[in-house]
Amino acid sequence: GARNGTYKMVCAGGADAGNCTFYNLEDDPLEEYPLKTPDSCARYSDKSWTPEDQEWHYCRLMEVVKEESYIKTVAKKE
């Protein structure tokens, strides 16, 4: 998983979107209500979304999970 000041991404079983749950820690500190996630991160990649957009945070945290987390280390070993 990964988090920033407001949002948190928790993944179980890999970094595929279907394995990850996204939370707003300010509105839901007990992580009871997962947020709706975007169908695609294309608008993140083309910079249409900014840090003002919740979707931007989802895509950024997904990027961190895929590129900078333990999941990447495990994938390299396989």
Image (cartoon, helix red, strand yellow):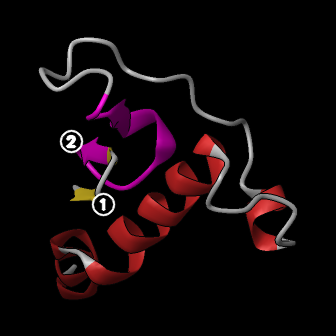
Q: Nearer the viewer, residue 42 or 7?
A: 7
On-image quarter of the N terminus: bottom left
Q: Residue at x 37, y 20 (%)?
A: 34
Which quarter of the picture shows residue 45? bottom right
Number of marks in the image?
Answer: 2
Secondary element under disc 2, as helix, strand or loop, is: loop
Badge 1 amino acid: Asn
Q: Which residue is mark 1?
A: 4
62 left or right of 50 in image:
left
Say few, some or many: other residues with alpha carbon within 10 Å of mark 1 (under 14 / 14 to 19 / 20 or more).
Answer: few
Q: x, y percentage for residue 72?
A: 28, 78
Q: Is residue 22 above or below residue 5?
A: above
Q: Which residue is mark 2?
A: 12
Q: Is residue 1 magenta?
A: no
Q: Nearer the viewer, residue 54 or 16?
A: 54
Whichever of callouts 1 and 2 sits on the residue coming sooner in the sequence is: 1
- Magenta residues, as a range? 8-26
Alpha-carbon span between mark 1 and mark 2: 19 Å
